[in-house]
Image: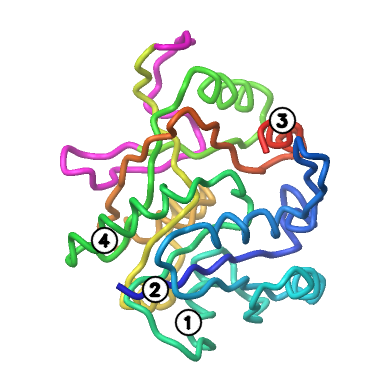
Amino acid sequence: MKTIILIPARYASSRYPGKPLVMLTGRDGVPKSLIQRSWEAAKGVADVTSVYVCTDDERIKAAAEAFGAQVIMTAESCANGTERCADALQHLTEEADLYVNLQGDAPLTPAWFIEDLIREMKANPEVQMATPVLRCDAQTHANFVEDRLHGRVGGTTAVFDAQMNALYFSKEVIPYTGKRFAEGDTIPVFHHVGVYGYRATALKSYSSWPVGPLETWEGLEQLRFLENGMPIRCVEVDGRGRVFWELNNPVDVARIESVI
């Protein structure tokens, strides 16, 4: 299966302007931009044909090309990462069986998350779109609850049916439990990992659909698929003891720097 990873990145984030170019210093003392660390994560995935940074910003383009990335310039009108990936599809000179959207704010995404996603879609050709979910550990769940208590939008959570097809995604912590958990507890909350796998038909369909009320209220692009009746397969992945956080707010910089 030929697979291309697309990394959508925009400068004008409403929550964190300039986020792709924020410098993150790892424990080795080496500072690298968020977009570079996301690109390096993508390059570490096995059996991927190509990786592209997709942006409409010349500053991101220049930074990405400086560290060796291939860049596709996309329309300024793209409202989210999936729209940007769909737009990039029109400019690609190569075709693939599967397109993976690795959002540019998730440099801690382990390679096996994406490999598990690809494996699921390869085994089930009827699945048009899939996304990983990770059972929360106590610290991640506590971070999510703390963010909401302080009015911050942190990670996204997912609920799904017995066949692992998504029922809903939310920036609230769902399902509601009303409790804090200790390390070692089995927590019934799943973190939605910011990665999507699409077949070309799913991406092309997305661009033709209007924005629905759930996507508008939650600000979650994947809800457009559910609102238009396209199932999303959730693929449970194993963190293997690794912490997975996205960079959503400035407070997340320190969290990520503590583990990279």
Q: Secondary structure at mark 4?
A: helix
Q: Which residue is mark 3?
A: 258
Q: Nearer the viewer, residue 253 or 32?
A: 32
Give the residues in magenta: 159-184
* CA–CA distance in space, label 3 to label 1: 36 Å
Comes first in the chain, label 3 or label 1: 1
Comes first in the chain, label 3 or label 4: 4
Q: Secondary structure at mark 1?
A: helix
Give the farthest residue toward the front: 28
Residue 39 screen position, x and y as percent: 62, 61
* CA–CA distance in space, label 3 to label 2: 35 Å
- Does 92 appear in magenta? no
Q: Which residue is mark 2?
A: 203
Comes first in the chain, label 4 or label 2: 4
User: Which of labels 4 and 2 is toward the front?
Assistant: 4
Comes first in the chain, label 3 or label 2: 2
User: Which of labels 3 and 4 is toward the front?
Assistant: 3
Q: Secondary structure at mark 3?
A: loop
Could you tell me if the residues under marks 2 and 1 are in contact, i.e. CB atoms within 8 Å?
yes
Which amino acid is tagged 1?
Leu
In the figure, 41 relative to 182: above or below? Answer: below
